[in-house]
Amino acid sequence: MRIRMVSVVGGDMSLLPHALNHYTGLGVTDFHLVRQLDPAEDGSALAASEAVMAAAGLSFAQVVRSPWAEDLNPRLIRAQMESHPDDWWLLADLDEFHVYDRPLQDVVDHCESGGFDYVKGAVLDRVTLDGSLPELDPVTSLWDQFPLAGPLTLRLLQARPTQVTLARGSVRVDFGQHRAWTGTPAPWDEIYTQVDHFKWTASVRPRLERRIQAYASGEWPVMNTCIIDESRRVLDHLLEHGERIDVGNPEFAFERCGKGGYRAWPQFARMMQELYEPDDARRRERWLLRHGLK
């Protein structure tokens, strides 16, 4: 059984070599990375990213030159997963690093033996000790550069941090990989993936400013305007705190830990289940009815 990874790679390439190294180390055998380019980008951007892939002995599964749209990622990911519907797929954005409590093959074996089709998890944000937003050091471990972990996505952005982290190719996954519409999940108290989120780098402000401008102007189609509000909350916070994350805010519950290892993870996992699963179950029923699967 092949273990594949699918992701859509946009403009910020700084995390690409780190991600390739991390997921190769986990046991991914096949990388299905789709390169998305804005029509205005010149050939140098593509060439630079292709060079990173080539250094790892890889190439992009697809190159798409298209304006960004909120439904672009899901369509590209779905197409890749459908190419091998019986295999297992890791689903992760380039800044999302899965940390499992056992070898990845053991996770797959657990799902196979238990009749489970996917694994759930949630994002914990990784930040520097002082909350600053640095350029990435290409050599030093990301976990050493960003030693604090906490639920910043949930508390500051007020955004949903849940993820489908591993799934059979046949599972239908929602936008952002936040929930699955089909299949049987592994029980959260048996396995729940900590997703270390390395978003908080020097590129945060320009990326969020660009996102707000493009969504607000209509340049990028948007179905959920909450994305704009989330971005504004971050920019307001950075302005208020001298372009840093306020790591001393108890609401953010930051703690120092290595790769994974967040002490309050069992309690956080339970909270995610209690917070989202009742509504997800209702939405899943409606989705199945709408698509004639119920």
Image: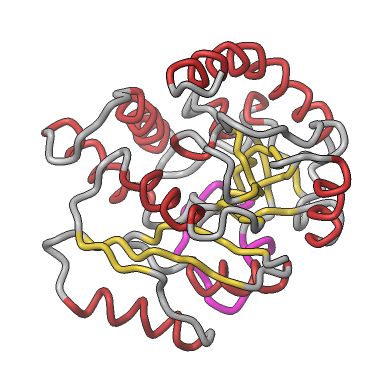
- Majority secondary structure of magenta residues: loop
In the rendered structure, which segment of residues is drawn in magenta?
128-145
Left or right? Give the position of 168 relative to 116: left
**Image quarter in which the N terminus is found:** bottom right
Based on the picture, tell me whether residue 218 belongs to the magenta stretch: no
Q: Is residue 63 above or below residue 258?
A: below
Query: How far from the left and from the top, in percent, is residue 291?
Result: 44, 23
**Image quarter in which the C terminus is found:** top right
Residue drawn at (17%, 38%), measured in percent from left and top? 213
Colour mapping: secondary structure
Query: How far from the left and from the top, in percent, is residue 183?
Result: 66, 34
Query: How far from the left and from the top, in percent, is residue 118?
Result: 69, 42
Q: Is residue 50 above or below residue 158?
A: below
Total number of numbered discs in the rendering: 0
Residue drawn at (82%, 26%), measured in percent from left and top? 267
Residue drawn at (56%, 29%), measured in percent from left and top? 181
Nearest the camera: 121 or 132?
A: 121
Query: How far from the left and from the top, in percent, is residue 11?
Result: 31, 62
Nearest the camera: 257 or 270?
A: 270
Left or right? Give the position of 246 relative to 218: right
Residue drawn at (36%, 46%), measured in percent from left and top? 75
Q: Is residue 72 above or below residue 212?
A: below
Left or right? Give the position of 51 relative to 197: left
Nearest the camera: 166 or 182?
A: 182
Based on the picture, tell me whether residue 142 belongs to the magenta stretch: yes
Residue 9 placement: quadrant = bottom left
